[in-house]
């Protein structure tokens, strides 16, 4: 992919985050999704002492904020901003949840960490926004310790959904330079040497049939 295409998508992402940074309904939906999966993620990856979340978003709020680990890092290409929700309690809660997380500016393709640094890496709805998914996943493999876990959440399309995205020219299509089918996502995991894969969620058949993306959540080693 051309770097200019990726930068266009990043500019659109920045505009999107500027719009939702004060939207409490959006925040509630985001929190519900993460908390729905948190218990099983903690159970499957228990014992992780060093955790990295990639592409946490400018709000600085992800799975890592709720994960009990001694060393917690988050990396994001866009600048982390101050929350502007309608109540101070919400804003203060978000800021307090950030206190134990070390935030770093960067991208998945060039992680500024030593090899074998983390027990757990979280990549939550990120791969359709990156410059090079395979390079990024190879970096994830590099920074994971032997026996470490990857938590991967990604929107997955049926054939109808892939065609639909190709034909779209609105901001949603432009903000997502990559689109994945089940097969291309699993091929990417295989290419980056993840062989043990546990599926937590794979969306609904109805969603797939009408051509909309399904949110898959996987744990891999």
Image (spheres, rainbow, N blue to C red):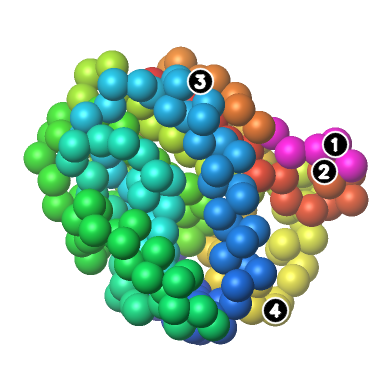
Q: Nearer the viewer, mark 3 or mark 4?
A: 3
Q: Position of residue 98 (x, y in %)?
A: 30, 59
Q: Is residue 172 left or right of residue 53?
A: right
Question: Counting other residues with Cα less than 10 Å from the Cα at mark 4, is it few (<14), some (14-19), or many (20 or more)?
Answer: few
Residue at mark 1: 205
Q: Which residue is tagged 4?
A: 170
Q: Position of residue 51 (x, y in %)?
A: 27, 38
Specify few, some or many for label 3: CA neighbours under 10 Å numbering under 14, 14-19, or 20 or more.
Answer: some
* Residue 176 drawn in magenta: no
Residue density around tag 2, few if under 14, some if 14–19, many if 20 or more, within 10 Å: some
Residue labelled with disc 3: 197
Residue 168 horizontal side relative to residue 69, left or right: right
Q: Are marks 1 and 2 in contact (CB under 8 Å)?
A: yes
Gap between marks 2 and 4, in whole Å? 21 Å
Distance, label 1 to label 2, CA atoms, is 5 Å
Residue linked to disc 2: 208
Label 3 vs 4, first from the N-terminus: 4
């Amino acid at each position: 992919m051309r770097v200019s295409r990726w930068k266009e998508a990043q500019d659109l992402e920045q505009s999107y985050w500027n719009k939702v940074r004060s939207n409490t309904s959006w925040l509630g939906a985001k929190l519900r999704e993460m908390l729905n999966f948190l218990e099983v993620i903690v159970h499957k990856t228990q014992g992780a002492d060093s955790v990295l979340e990639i592409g946490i978003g400018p709000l600085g709020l992800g799975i890592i904020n709720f994960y009990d680990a001694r060393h917690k890092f988050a990396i994001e290409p866009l600048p982390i901003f101050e929350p502007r929700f309608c109540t101070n309690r919400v804003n203060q809660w978000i800021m307090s949840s950030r206190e134990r997380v070390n935030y770093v500016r960067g991208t998945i393709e060039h992680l500024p960490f030593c090899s074998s640094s983390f027990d757990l890496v979280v990549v939550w709805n990120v791969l359709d926004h990156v410059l090079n998914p395979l390079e990024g996943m190879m970096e994830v493999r590099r920074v994971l310790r032997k026996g470490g876990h990857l938590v991967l959440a990604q929107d997955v399309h049926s054939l109808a959904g892939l065609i639909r995205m190709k034909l779209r020219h609105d901001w949603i299509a432009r903000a997502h330079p990559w689109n994945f089918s089940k097969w291309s996502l699993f091929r990417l995991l295989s290419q980056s040497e993840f062989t043990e894969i546990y599926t937590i969620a794979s969306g609904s058949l109805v969603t797939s049939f009408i051509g909309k993306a399904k949110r898959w959540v996987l744990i891999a080693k």
